[in-house]
């Protein structure tokens, strides 16, 4: 009888400690992503077309929302080492298209904002980092679009 009580108590403790309900229903974070707060709203893009050519890294994020315009964010830097890169005109662009057509609206980097890319980790075929970008559309209005608290972990293709 004593062995049965120990066995039952052991089973009870094991079953109660084996499953943590607060963690069992949270899906794991994707290992490939580009995310940011686009004008204070969560934004995520597919980084499938990101490349490295010699010492130039091009990070491309494209959204695929059915029934909506396709959004593309492109950041290009000449890689020197890990750390912060201050981005200037021509190093980042954001545009929308209707499918695979020419850009409907193109936004260039706002040169009055401290646009930056920070590379935390780089190895052949993989890059991890963060970014803060602000874009401006000069025509037909001076609308700005911000990508703040951006982060990415992406594979790089040659």
Image: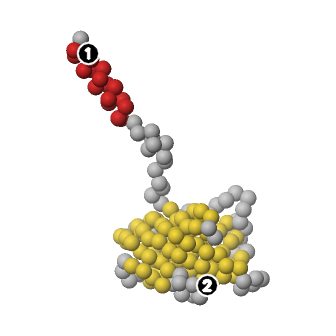
Given residues 4 and 136, the one toward you in this image is: 4
Q: Residue at (22%, 16%) from the top-left corner?
A: 3
Res. 131 in view: yes
Quadrant location, the C terminus: bottom left
Given residues 18 and 111, the one toward you in this image is: 18
Looking at the image, is mark 1 or mark 2 earlier in the sequence? 1
User: Quick check: 112 left or right of 141?
Assistant: left
Hey, which quadrant is residue 22 in on the image? Answer: top left
Whole-percent x, y for residue 8 in the image: 30, 20
Whole-percent x, y for residue 90 in the image: 57, 86
Whether 98 is drawn above or below 92: the answer is: above
Callout 2 crowding tier (Cα within 10 Å): few <14, some 14–19, many ≥20: many
Q: Which mark is residue 4?
A: 1
Q: Residue at (53%, 82%) from the top-left corner?
A: 115
Callout 1 crowding tier (Cα within 10 Å): few <14, some 14–19, many ≥20: few
The residue under label 2 is 110
Q: Foreground mark, 1 or 2? A: 1
User: Quick check: 18 left or right of 93?
Assistant: left
Whole-percent x, y for residue 155 in the image: 45, 65
């Amino acid at each position: 009888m004593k062995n049965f009580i120990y066995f039952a108590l052991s089973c009870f403790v094991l079953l109660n400690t084996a499953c943590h309900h607060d963690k069992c229903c949270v899906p794991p974070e994707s290992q490939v992503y580009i995310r940011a707060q686009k004008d204070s709203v969560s934004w995520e893009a597919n980084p499938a077309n990101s490349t490295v050519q010699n010492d130039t890294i091009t990070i491309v994020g494209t959204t695929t929302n059915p029934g909506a315009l396709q959004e593309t964010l492109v950041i290009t830097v000449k890689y020197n080492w890990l750390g912060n890169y201050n981005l200037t005109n021509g190093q980042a662009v954001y545009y929308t298209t209707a499918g695979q057509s020419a850009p409907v609206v193109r936004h260039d980097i706002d040169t009055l904002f401290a646009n930056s890319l920070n590379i935390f980790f780089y190895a052949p075929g993989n890059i991890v980092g963060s970014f803060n970008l602000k874009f401006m559309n000069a025509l037909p209005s001076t609308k700005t679009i911000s990508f703040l608290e951006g982060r990415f972990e992406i594979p790089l293709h040659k």
